[in-house]
Amino acid sequence: MLAEVILLAVVAAGWLAGRWLLNRYRRKSRPGSHGDEAEAGSERLTDTIAFVGGAYGILLGLLLVFAVGHFVDARQVSKDEAATAAALFAAVDPFPVTVRDTLRHDLLCYMSSAATDDWAAMRAGDLTGSENTGAYASRVQKEIAALPQDKDVEASNHYFVTEEILDLAKDRQLRLLHAVPEIPPVIWLVLYVSAFLFMGLTVFHLGQRGWLTRLAVAATTLLLMAIIGALIQLDAPYVGIGTSLRPVALDAAMERLRDANPTPASLWAPCKRLAAEEAG
């Protein structure tokens, strides 16, 4: 919202600057020209406007591609995390039921906390994530380290289980990192300066063509608002309106696991909170 307000202020400033330049140019025209020379002079700005508009369009296009890539990467890493968690659930099957079911319950609690607590932390831009999710991740890792390796099948499977928990930790960290917008402030400054210049030159170029000027400015402003809005939403994939990523993959993975493993009931027992969330 703040970026759109700034853009509107920049557009308004560009309009005023263009009108000021046009009036100043007209006053300096020769007496008796009735503005004809001013109009002819404004026509010479065509190449400049084409250059500024073209450069601005290229920049916006590149940023849209960059923002879409950021959004797609964030969506993919959340899918990878859900797939890794489901694979870890299956990988502990050869171990004794006494330790396996406890580990699986804590893994499901991790997934549930990641889909709720961690998602709330990402919306707030917290790179550390939820304290509760982190506590369950730590508990699962310790339980995996304590798994027995007396039998050959347990020893061979322990390697794959360890690999899965490491991948799960990596996927979570990448998901948290994608919550931070990646377009730097200096690029936003360039966007606003370019919008100011383009709007000012356009108003100056159109001169006293009142309705045509208003139409051109309205159309340009609408397009810029749409593009800037899309950039903001895509660059912050967890907080966007209409584009906000949701924990669909994690929820789907838990639903599939529940459907495939309805018993024992202890797997689906309520999860305790292992840590309180830090304020701010």
Image: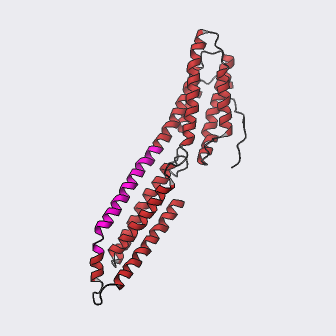
Is 268 placed left or right of 190 in the picture?
right
Vertical arrangement, residue 158 with respect to residue 105, above or below = above
Q: Which of 40/238 is in front?
A: 40
Q: Position of residue 98 (x, y in %)?
A: 69, 17
Of all residues, the one furthest to the top in this rendering is 151
Is 262 placed left or right of 242 in the picture?
right
* Residue 172: in magenta span: no
Can you tell which quarter of the image residue 223 is in?
bottom left
Can you tell which quarter of the image residue 20 is in?
bottom left
Vertical arrangement, residue 122 with respect to residue 91, above or below = below
Can you tell which quarter of the image residue 278 is in?
top right
Of all residues, the one furthest to the bottom in this rendering is 32
* Residue 61: in magenta span: yes
Tell me the chief SS of the magenta region.
helix
Residue at 64% from the left image edge and 31% from the top image edge: 137
Residue at 48% from the left image edge and 49% from the top image edge: 234
Vertical arrangement, residue 57 with respect to residue 24, above or below = above
Q: Position of residue 161 (x, y in %)?
A: 58, 21
Vertical arrangement, residue 2 with respect to residue 93, above or below = below
Is 237 placed left or right of 130 in the picture?
left
Whether residue 181 can be seen here:
yes
Is 30 placed left or right of 259 in the picture?
left
Q: Which segment is the magenta one? A: 42-70
Q: Position of residue 125 (x, y in %)?
A: 59, 47
